Image (cartoon, grey):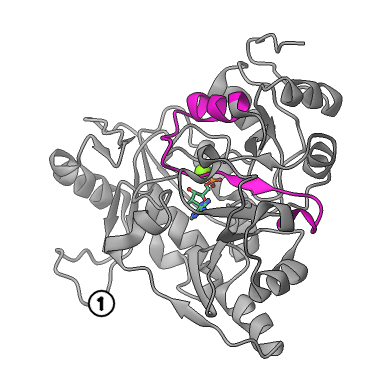
Amino acid sequence: MKFQPHHKESLVSLDEAVVFLKANQPVAIPTETVYGLAAPISSEEGLKAIFEIKARPFFDPLIVHIDQYDDVFSLTSFWPQEAGLLARHFWPGPLTLVVEKSSAVSNLISSGLSTVGLRMPLHPMMRTLISRCGPLAAPSANKFGKTSPTQAQHIIEEYQGLLPVVDGGPCSVGIESTIVKIESSHRITLLRSGMISQEEISQVLLEHQIPFQWQNISEKYNTEISPGRMKHHYMPRVPLVIYDPQRETKQPRISEFSHDLLKEFYLQCRAQIPDSVEGVSLVKPENIKEVHELLLPSSPALAARQLYSLLRETPPSADLILCNGLQIPKTSSWEPIWDRLKKAATLVWS
Ligand code: AMP
Ligand code: MG
């Protein structure tokens, strides 16, 4: 069976999704973090198609999703004690563990790295698909650099009905998983923040008296260690400008957040904004007719759940999104939201 594109309507059942996945056709699938675009790890044709559909560069590795703990042993060449402990504590859930891969993981998945990112998702539909098709490699289902989808409708709109989508409802977490790399000699590195925090991870390791040391990623090795760590990511349809004045600033100060002043700031900076950064193109409207203010809920869990939907729900008439950073706390539970906002932003007034 081959997927027949429908204009604006491309929902498929779990049974149909299994048939497409087994026939090497990627399917957009729900997880609790964001919607992914999946293919079985053994399907070279399906994996290649994921990169083509997303316009994702081959240097950006895919996460492998499993539904049985024992799969880690066939997918890795070394499964550190720390990884076992964190997996048993946080899986199924929004934590990806990067460890040394086995030959069962192709270079297409790992982008030629010696490691693989593994996660056991919680979403029951995704679990059913994995149990019927085997481990699934799946990046987020958005086009490269764009906002991740958190509802089936986001994918139908983005791909105009050309991609089969399993509708699993709105994602409960709403932002991508926390990614932690675990090496031998107790070195661990936070590659991407997420709703499972660095403190929670430390606490689990401490409770079990496992020695560990967090490694810092220097700017220089940023993309070598984890190629998907781009400066711009999650970008909405129109530029996002964040007002986040720091105490020690060299920028001209504005006394308070104002739509007009931020619009002026964007227009003044516009000429200096590059057309693209690391392969992600930046949208730069010349005239701003309407601005839209991004307003986030006051709890971090709700803000994460709604962030991408709110960015996508920018009114079609608006050509600039503004965010008042002073309204968003600088505490550790808001860190992953700040991370996504800063990467989605074209400009930050800091
Ligand atoms: P996505 O699934 O689109 O949210 O992105 C997956 C991200 O996980 C990539 O962009 C990388 O930053 C990271 N990742 C996946 N596998 C690895 C790996 N083997 N080593 C380092 N980072 C990885
Ligand atoms: Mg992504």
Residue sitting nearer the eye, 269 or 110: 110
Give left or right: position of 16 versus 275: right
Q: Residue at x 67, y 58 (%)?
A: 94
Q: Is residue 255 above or below residue 261?
A: below
Give left or right: position of 323 versus 206: left
Q: Does 71 appear in magenta?
A: yes
Q: Does 170 appear in magenta?
A: no
Residue sitting nearer the eye, 312 or 203: 203
Query: Is any part of residue 120 visible from this angle?
Result: no
Q: Residue at x 15, y 64 (%)?
A: 251
Q: Looking at the picture, how far across and down is residue 134, in whole percent?
A: 77, 39
Dot 1: element:
loop
Mark 1: give few (<14), some (14-19) or many (20+) Cα within 10 Å.
few
Q: Amino acid at mark 1?
A: Arg
Q: Looking at the picture, how far across and down is residue 279, in whole percent?
A: 31, 36
Q: Is residue 306 above or below residue 153?
A: below
Q: Looking at the picture, how far across and down is residue 258, in whole percent?
A: 31, 55
Residue sitting nearer the eye, 111 or 341: 111
The boundaries of the magenta stretch are 45-72
Q: Which residue is mark 1?
A: 247
Q: Looking at the picture, how far across and down is residue 7, in whole percent?
A: 63, 10
The N terminus is located in which quarter? top right
